[in-house]
Amino acid sequence: MRFLPDAEQRAFTGVLDALLTAADTPAVVREWGRGEHARGRALWARLGKAGVFGLAVPQEYGGAGRRPVELALAFVELGRHAVPGPLVETVAAAVLLDAPPYAGRFLPGLAAGEEAATVAPPGGPALDGDAAALRLALTPGGLYLAKPGPVRASLDPARRLTPLAPDGAPLLTAPPCERALGWARLAVAAQALGVGLALLDRTVRYVGQRTQFGVPVGSFQAVKHRLADAKTALEFARPLVLGAAVSMRPADVAAAKLRACEAAYTTARTALHLHGAIGYTAEYDLSLWLTKARALRTAWGTPEECRALVLADALGEVAP
């Protein structure tokens, strides 16, 4: 099935693309990785005004209503521009807190981009706990406000990991964890698709400029085959992501995350191979997308977990 964005959706993604292109996101990413959040927070506020975070928030709390298709399209752009910060975690928090009295307390600020949120799953660290104004910890006992621990480095320098400890009584003893997981996985899938598209675009441009034996490297048949394989993987992932956004079935979302993250990871390996030694340098902008493709692969569900859910659904072992 072909999923074609309508005119309004294309205009929305066009606005995001122009906004992020003007923001010089590579510079923002590097500052964020050093713990300098000023420009990142300013960009976050502009994304909030553009309506990105409101796509996960009901209208009565200042959002646009739950619109997973538009959210997926927006996160593709966020991935293409390597926007840093707890983007997925803010979406998950918006879904987790959609219950009185906390919805009215927290959701308007999240929708407007005035605050960023992060969530720590049971036994795991949160993303960017030092930058998020709202920190939540999920435990078997429920959802808690949390206190941050020391920041830890990760494979992706712009994804700063922070352990969170529950602080006080639980906000909710039975938060909608499965629904929040579905929204988070959809956002990761779309973000990974955008990362893969950016890596492919940059690699195509590079091999068209780099010469060997007096001709562009991109004219070699072996290089064309590698790029074609990456392009095919990404284009097969795209309808899975948009189809999952339409259905929001857990197995569909898991399949989309699995395929999009694997396609982005395959494209990252191709990009690194075809760039050669320069691709390994942190100073070269390509690295900002390479490390993100690797990190997103296991964010909010490993390939094994997603594959198991898809298989269980195919065998009729998962409730629709």
Image (cartoon, rainbow, N blue to C red):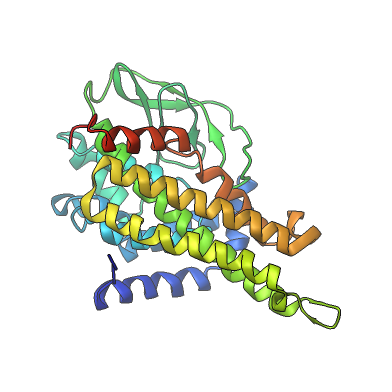
- In the picture, measured across the screen, residue 147 lies left or right of residue 225, that is left
Task: Please state the horizontal and vertical placement of residue 252, each as a whole percent of the image.
Answer: 29, 46
Quadrant location, the N terminus: bottom left
Instruction: Tell me what residue is drawn at x 35 percent, y 55 percent.
Output: 241
- In the picture, measured across the screen, residue 215 lies left or right of residue 98, that is right
Question: Outermost residue toward the bottom?
Answer: 214
Q: Considering only vertical position in the picture, is 168 above or below 128?
A: above
What is the total number of numbered labels drawn onto the structure image? 0
Quadrant location, the C terminus: top left
Task: Please state the horizontal and vertical placement of residue 115, each as a whole percent of the image.
Answer: 37, 47
- In the picture, measured across the screen, residue 45 lies left or right of residue 197, that is left
Can you tell which quarter of the image residue 285 is in?
Answer: bottom right
Instruction: Tell me what residue is drawn at x 13 percent, y 51 percent.
Output: 60
Q: Nearer the viewer, residue 256 or 23?
A: 256
Asked if residue 274 can be seen in this view, the reply is yes
- In the picture, measured across the screen, residue 115 lies left or right of residue 123, that is left
Task: Please state the horizontal and vertical placement of residue 105, each as a whole percent of the image.
Answer: 22, 39
Q: Nearer the viewer, residue 132 or 65?
A: 65
Q: Considering only vertical position in the picture, is 112 above or below 176?
A: below
Asked if residue 36 can be seen in this view, the reply is no
Instruction: Tell me what residue is drawn at x 59 percent, y 32 percent.
Output: 151
Instruction: Tell me what residue is drawn at x 55 percent, y 62 percent.
Output: 230
Task: Please state the horizontal and vertical placement of residue 272, each as a whole percent of the image.
Answer: 70, 57
Q: Considering only vertical position in the picture, is 236 above or below 142?
A: below
Question: Outermost residue toward the right?
Answer: 213
Q: Nearer the viewer, residue 19 or 306?
A: 306
